[in-house]
Amino acid sequence: MNRSVIFTEAAPPAIGPYSQAIRIGQFLFTSGQIPMDPATGQLVADDIRTQTHQVLKNITAILEKAGTSLPNVVKVTAFLRDMNDFKAFNEIYAQYLGEIKPARSAVQVARLPLDVAVEIECVAICP
């Protein structure tokens, strides 16, 4: 199977030796996305709601570049700085995902890149 790198300027560039996403066959695997505004290269406000919005916008841009979209996401892993933010995170997350919610794991971690509040990665089907 061919493997291809997905890159879009509509999402932040990788801040290390990795790709925004890799497509192999009909599957797309995104790297963890953080709440960085791709236009400015700056992190958005520190609150979980604003950061979750930005992360999901970044993921949407990557999915679109690969020819897919949020309804085709089958697995999400969310990393939270503080599990006390889980309810607020879910409120924003639910606005982006369609009728059929993907499988998901959400975990609290000790620290995230650039000390952000949330990082999300996903697996999607590319029709």
Image (cartoon, rainbow, N blue to C red):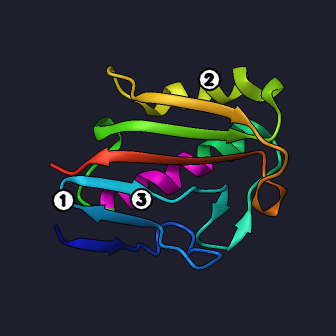
Q: Quadrant of residue 70?
A: top left
What mark, if any, has residue 61 been given in the picture?
Answer: 3
Q: Is residue 13 left or right of residue 73?
A: right
Residue contact at pointers 1 and 3, CB within 8 angstroms: no
Percent coordinates x, y for residue 56 in the rendering: 53, 46
Q: CA distance from mark 1 to mark 3?
A: 19 Å
Report the residue marked by disc 2. Answer: 91
Q: Relative to residue 83, is residue 27 drawn left or right?
A: left
Estimate how packed mark 2 is, as few (under 14), some (14 to 19) or many (20 or more) residues with alpha carbons within 10 Å.
Answer: few
Can you say whether 45 is above or below 109 in the image?
below
Question: Disc 2 to disc 3, how far (Cα)?
Answer: 21 Å
Which circle, 1 or 3, is nearer the viewer? 1
Mark 1: few, some, or many residues within 10 Å (few <14, many ≥20)? few
Give the camera-side residue of 33 and 43.
33
Residue type marked 1: Gly
Residue designated by label 1: 25
Residue type at mark 3 is Ala
Q: SS at mark 1?
A: loop
Query: Tag 2 or tag 1, which sits nearer the N-term?
Result: 1
Q: Residue at x 78, y 42 (%)?
A: 109
Task: Return the x and y of residue 102 as percentages of the image width and height.
Answer: 39, 29
Percent of width and height locating residue 32: 57, 55
Q: Secondary structure at mark 2?
A: helix
The residue located at (61%, 39%) in the rendering is 78
> Magenta region's main secondary structure?
helix
Check disc 3: other Cα within 10 Å, few if <14, some if 14-19, many if 20+.
Answer: many
Magenta stretch encompasses residue 36:
no
Query: Left of 39 or right of it: where is 28?
Result: left
State the residue in front, 11 or 20.
20
Q: Which stretch is magenta?
A: 54-64
Task: Please give the name of the residue rendered at 59% of the width and 72% of the height, measured from the top-left corner.
Answer: 39
